[in-house]
């Protein structure tokens, strides 16, 4: 069934509607087998719909999905059991933890070694089988429930594991355990991981291939900043957006007052002192909120809070060391008005 | 008011002495209501599940009819069932009039809309995530249907207990179809009606106490299950 040269997923001219509203439009997307791909973007942008389509829970109203080179339709989908999704708010069946984790194996008709597999799956997500297997669904904390739901997917040894905002409602230690579990799954089984998250730094620690989903479209890569309108004309050639603390972002000719600008984090220069001598139109003061290493590169992503506007900036690890930048410090972000592209 | 106090004392004496006539009515009530509940569940749960789970043409009108029948007066059920099972009726040859199975059939018709409607509501009220979860774990259509019913089990049990409460407390059907025959078809409710008419309050109060205890048991179970669901 597998086409050796074809990607695992190929989405072509895909569209999904909610009523009259255009929810998702993807002209083309390839996802290779064994990769980890992340999707990031604001709420309502279409991430969850995309993940439901990739997990075959929803079918697009238009376009085609090829899985392993085979066209998938709602009535003919031999791959349904190879793909599983952990939703943002997973539902646990009103049964014990053991029965929840074992359910997927039982519906596949497996009878041998279920207990051992359940114990292994629970250990994989950091839950002690001895104290958890007999617990009821309502005797778990939010993080424990999330991990039981993940264990019930991992036990299936899926070809594709899809996670929708897996760390939204869990504490830091659960987020770390989830990361370790899915990384182990990928290493051992070559499982393809597809993950959506708001948590850019967490997602960045899992994969470097992160796409931004905005207003139903894949608009680029994750670290690109989205700056929403409204824009007001300030001079003949410039428009401005006033931030909550009074700072101003200047841009060149947006399509309309409500346009959204995209800013590449590599186009932002960071300074620890106020940069009086630079000619760029935008100089924003901000507090460093987070720093993270970009996988497979010598760069870091720095998250700044500039008067309520979050900006992601890319700096080299050397520059971060030389400037001695730490979270909590005030820095200045400098970029040209012409660096803002329009969505 | 003395006769009421005396009636209560006599009632407790009747219950404590395990009075045969009193306990005959209690046992008859339990036999009839259990039989009618078994019949109504075997028909009502599959019908209610189908009505709540599947989408099909005519679903809404059927649902409206079932919901309307929830308020069906017991005497109307009694009237129709009497017409069918009396000697002149189409089912007269089975000799069901004035028998326990006859009352059970009429009670089944009375409580069937409760079982169907509440089961359908239980299935319709299931969390939307149940279906997605079961699909994502690899369940097939029949497995999804069965697991959905299991997920709604506490709400379905509420339907069962509500129906049981209606069955043990109704009087019209038992009186019309059963005929209130002593040692035979006399139930708690028909005995209370008769004894009250005769001015014999002690047995009426004794049976009333038992009925109230059963009602408390039913309501207690309902409260527990609502919490679980």
Image (cartoon, coloured by chain):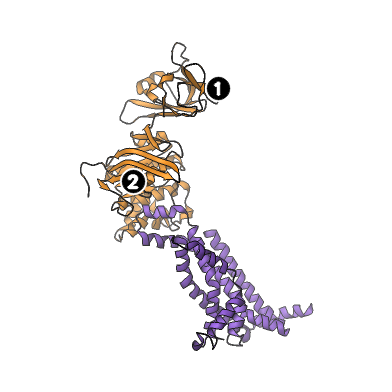
Please give left or right for residue A70 compared with residue A340 in the image.
left
User: Observer-nearest residue: B187 or B43?
Assistant: B43
Q: Residues within 10 Å of mark 1 (few under 14, many from 20)?
A: few
* In the rendered image, residues at marks 1 and 2 fall on the same chain: yes
Compared with B97, A194 (above or below) is above
Please give left or right for residue B103 compared with residue A320 in the image.
right
Whole-percent x, y for residue A341 in the image: 40, 25
Q: Residues within 10 Å of mark 2 (few under 14, many from 20)?
A: many
Can you identify the residue that label 2 sits on?
A161
Compared with A173, B185 (above or below) is below
Name the residue: 56% across, 62% down: B224
| Residue A24 figure quarter | top left
Whole-percent x, y for residue A64 in the image: 31, 45
- The chain displayed purple equals B
Can you identify the residue that label 1 sits on?
A246
Q: Which mark is residue B171?
A: none
Q: According to the rendering, which colour does chain A have?
A: orange
Q: Secondary structure at mark 1?
A: loop
User: Observer-nearest residue: A54 or A259?
Assistant: A259
User: Observer-nearest residue: A195 or B170?
Assistant: B170
The chain to which mark 2 is attached is A
Whole-percent x, y for residue B183 in the image: 59, 88
């Amino acid at each position: 069934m597998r086409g050796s040269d074809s990607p695992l997923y190929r989405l072509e001219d895909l569209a999904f509607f909610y009523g009259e509203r255009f929810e998702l439009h993807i002209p083309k997307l390839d996802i290779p087998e064994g990769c980890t791909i992340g999707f990031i973007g604001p709420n309502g942008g279409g991430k969850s719909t995309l993940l439901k389509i990739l997990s075959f829970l929803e079918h697009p109203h238009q376009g085609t999905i090829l899985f392993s080179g085979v066209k998938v339709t709602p009535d003919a989908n031999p791959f349904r059991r190879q793909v599983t999704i952990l939703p943002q708010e997973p539902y646990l069946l009103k049964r014990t933890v053991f029965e929840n984790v074992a359910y997927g194996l039982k519906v596949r008709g497996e009878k041998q070694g279920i207990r051992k597999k359940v114990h292994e799956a629970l250990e994989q997500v950091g839950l002690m089988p001895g104290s958890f297997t007999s617990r009821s669904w309502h005797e778990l904390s939010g993080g424990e429930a999330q991990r039981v739901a993940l264990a019930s997917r991992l036990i299936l040894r899926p070809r594709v594991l899809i996670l929708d905002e897996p760390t939204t409602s869990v504490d830091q230690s659960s987020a770390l355990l989830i990361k370790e579990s899915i990384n182990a799954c990928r290493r051992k089984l070559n499982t393809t991981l597809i993950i959506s998250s708001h948590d850019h730094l967490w997602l960045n620690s899992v994969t470097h291939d992160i796409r931004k989903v905005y207003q139903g479209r894949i608009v680029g890569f994750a670290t690109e900043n989205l700056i929403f309108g409204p824009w007001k004309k300030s001079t003949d050639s410039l428009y401005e957006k006033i931030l909550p603390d009074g700072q101003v972002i200047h841009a060149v000719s947006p399509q309309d007052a409500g346009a959204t600008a995209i800013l590449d984090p590599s186009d932002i220069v960071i300074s620890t002192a106020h940069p009086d001598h630079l000619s760029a139109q935008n100089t924003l003061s901000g507090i460093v909120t987070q720093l993270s290493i970009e996988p497979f590169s010598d760069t870091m992503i720095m998250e700044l809070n500039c008067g309520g506007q979050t900006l992601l900036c890319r700096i080299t690890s050397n520059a971060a060391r030389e400037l001695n930048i730490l979270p909590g410090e005030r820095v200045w972000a400098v970029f040209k008005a012409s660096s803002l592209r329009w969505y | 008011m003395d006769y009421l106090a005396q009636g209560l004392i006599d009632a407790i004496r009747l219950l404590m002495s395990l009075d045969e006539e009193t306990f005959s009515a209690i046992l008859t009530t339990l036999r009839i209501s259990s039989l009618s509940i078994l019949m109504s569940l075997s028909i009502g749960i599959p019908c209610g599940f189908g009505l709540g789970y599947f989408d099909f043409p005519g679903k809404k009108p059927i649902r409206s009819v079932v919901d309307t029948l929830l308020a069906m007066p017991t005497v109307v059920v009694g009237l129709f069932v009497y017409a069918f099972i009396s000697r002149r009726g189409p089912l007269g040859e089975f000799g069901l009039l004035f028998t326990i199975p006859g009352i059970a059939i009429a009670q089944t018709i009375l409580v069937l809309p409760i079982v169907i409607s509440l089961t359908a509501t239980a299935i319709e009220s299931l969390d939307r995530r149940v279906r997605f979860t079961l699909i994502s774990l690899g369940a097939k259509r029949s497995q999804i249907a069965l697991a959905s019913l299991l997920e709604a089990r506490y709400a379905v049990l509420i339907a069962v207990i509500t129906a049981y409460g209606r069955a043990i407390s109704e009087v019209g059907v038992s009186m019309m179809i059963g005929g209130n025959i002593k040692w035979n078809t006399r139930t708690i409710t028909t005995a209370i009606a008769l004894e009250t008419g005769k001015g014999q309050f002690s047995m009426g109060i004794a049976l009333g106490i038992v009925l109230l205890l059963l009602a408390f048991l039913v309501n207690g179970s309902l409260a527990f299950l609502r919490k679980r669901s």
